[in-house]
Image (tube, coloured by chain):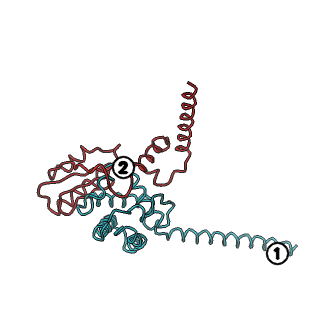
Amino acid sequence: MKTLRITSAILAVAFIALILYANLRHLSVTERLKHVQLVSFNLSGSLSDKSRVSLTEKISSSPGVTACSINPEGTIASVIYYPDEVDEATLNALLSTQCNTEKRELAAVGGCPVHQVNASVQQFVSMLDLRTR
Amino acid sequence: MKTKLFKNVAVVFTILTLAFAVSCSDDDDEMKEDTTLYTRLGGIDAISAVTDQFLANVAADSKINARFEATVANSSRLQLLRNNLIDQICAGSGGPCQYKGKTMAAAHAGMGITQDEFNALVGDLVAALDKFSVPAQEKNDLLAILGPMQSDIVGK
């Protein structure tokens, strides 16, 4: 019972310390930026160069979208967006006006050059930081 | 009486001269600050916009997107990669950021990135800069900062 109490106390102190660290650390300029998400679609159907450029511009200028790119072959579209302003379904609907779309299933492991553990720790600290909400 | 007046005029003149010198000095500092590449690029918002476009280009680029798929598919990894890229450009161009990621050599060790893949990546960055009509001088200055990283990335 005593061990349990001591362990609980240590965990509580550690958690409070982590919350204090998350909220008192110096926030860099980039840490103050709004979080984004990326979605990628496979495109099919005939998409001319002109249509590709105009579709890219249309998506890029949509509210909540920070960037859009369609490759020169017209087979892949990638969109970076603010998830609190626009969602995947809306982006899919916008793209579907000129070609057939299918969400790309991206690989879950590997990748360059940011590793999952670092990213998860940063995300956890960021979640505890009331200033970044 | 005349001496006192002369002294007062001298004091006022000295104060005005000092004030002018200080204000000139401030202007010089501002001029220096204004000429950093960071400022010429448009600050953090412009760098952030170019970085997002660069990441979207890479994710749509069938030559290299397999290298980044798992990173950009995961929200927390995408966020960290984006922040690292923005910090790197911001710090390298003289802005108020500090790059906190790994060194380029450590981050790309064992990945076996080819010259063609690196060239495709640079092409995606140039396309992002062109999309925002970044002038040739600023584009070349930025590429000159990032160029030397090639030896730490290719063939490791």
Name the quadrant containing residue A52: bottom left
Which chain does the numbered disc 2 sit on? A
Classify residue B50 as left or right of residue B1. Answer: left
The residue lying at 22 percent from left, 51 percent from top is: A41
The residue lying at 20 percent from left, 63 percent from top is: A72
The local crowd at label 2, few if under 14, some if 14 to 19, many if 20 or more residues have their Cα within 10 Å, is some
Labels 2, 1: front one:
2
Quick check: marks 2 and 1 in contact, CB under 8 Å? no
SS of the residue under disc 1:
helix
Q: Position of residue B52 (x, y in %)?
A: 35, 57
Whether B138 is drawn above or below A76: the answer is below
Identity of the amino acid at label 2? Val
- Chain that the image shows in red: A
Q: Position of residue A15 (x, y in %)?
A: 53, 37
Classify residue A133 as left or right of residue B65. Answer: right
Residue A16, numbered label: none
Q: Which one is nearer the viewer's eye here, A37 or B138? A: A37
Name the quadrant containing residue A46: bottom left
Residue named by callout 1: B6
Q: Is residue A122 visible?
A: yes
- Chain that the image shows in cyan: B
Name the quadrant of the C terminus of chain A: top left
Residue A36, numbered label: 2
Which chain does the numbered disc 1 sit on? B
Q: Is residue B89 visible?
A: no
Q: Residue furthest left?
A: A46
